[in-house]
Image: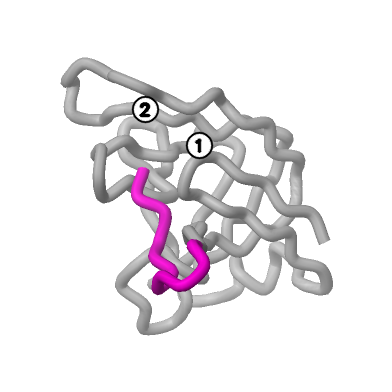
Amino acid sequence: MKQLVQGDLLLVEVSGETVEVFRNHDGSGRIQPQDGKIVILIGEKTGHAHTVDAETAELYLPCGNTNFYGSRLVVVADTQIVHERLDGKPSGELHESMDVPAGIYTVKTQRVYMPKVESRRVRD
C-alpha cells in the first residue's frame, strides 16, 4: 500500500476500486474544479491549500460527508499536488510539490503523536 505525504495531507493508495465506480455515481459527491484546480485539503493553521490540476484528477466525497477526510482522489494521469495560497497573500513557507502517479487514493490528514500527550491532527 503506497502512502504519499505533503505536510498535513496523507494519501493512501486504494486497491480493488476502479474509476468507473465513481464515475457511474450520480455525481453529487464530486468536487467541482475552481480555476482549473481541485482543492484536496486546506491547512487550518496557515490557509495553504493542497491542489491538483483538474485535467489530471477528480475528487469525490464519501456519501453524506461535508469534509475531505476519507474522500477519494482519482488520478487519471501522473500529476503533481501543489501547496499554495489561494487568496493572493504572500506564500510564506510552502511544501515542495509532490509527484502522484495515476491511481485511486483515500485522502486523510496526518496526526501528531507525542507520548503521554493526547494525539492531535497535524496543523499545516
The residue at which mark 2 appears reads as: 84
Q: What residue span does the magenta drawing correspond to?
A: 114-124
The residue at which mark 1 appears reads as: 52
x 31%, y 35%: residue: 48
Which of these two is toward me, 12 or 121? 121
81 displayed left or right of 92: right
Q: Mark yes or no: residue 85 visible.
A: yes
| Mark 2: few/some/many CA within 10 Å (<14, 14-19, 20+) | many
x 28%, y 19%: residue: 91
Which element type, helix, strand or loop, lies under badge 2?
A: strand
**Looking at the picture, how far across and down is residue 97, in whole percent?**
56, 25
x 73%, y 59%: residue: 13
x 44%, y 37%: residue: 51
Which element type, helix, strand or loop, lies under badge 1?
A: strand
Q: Is residue 121 magenta?
A: yes
99 displayed left or right of 124: right
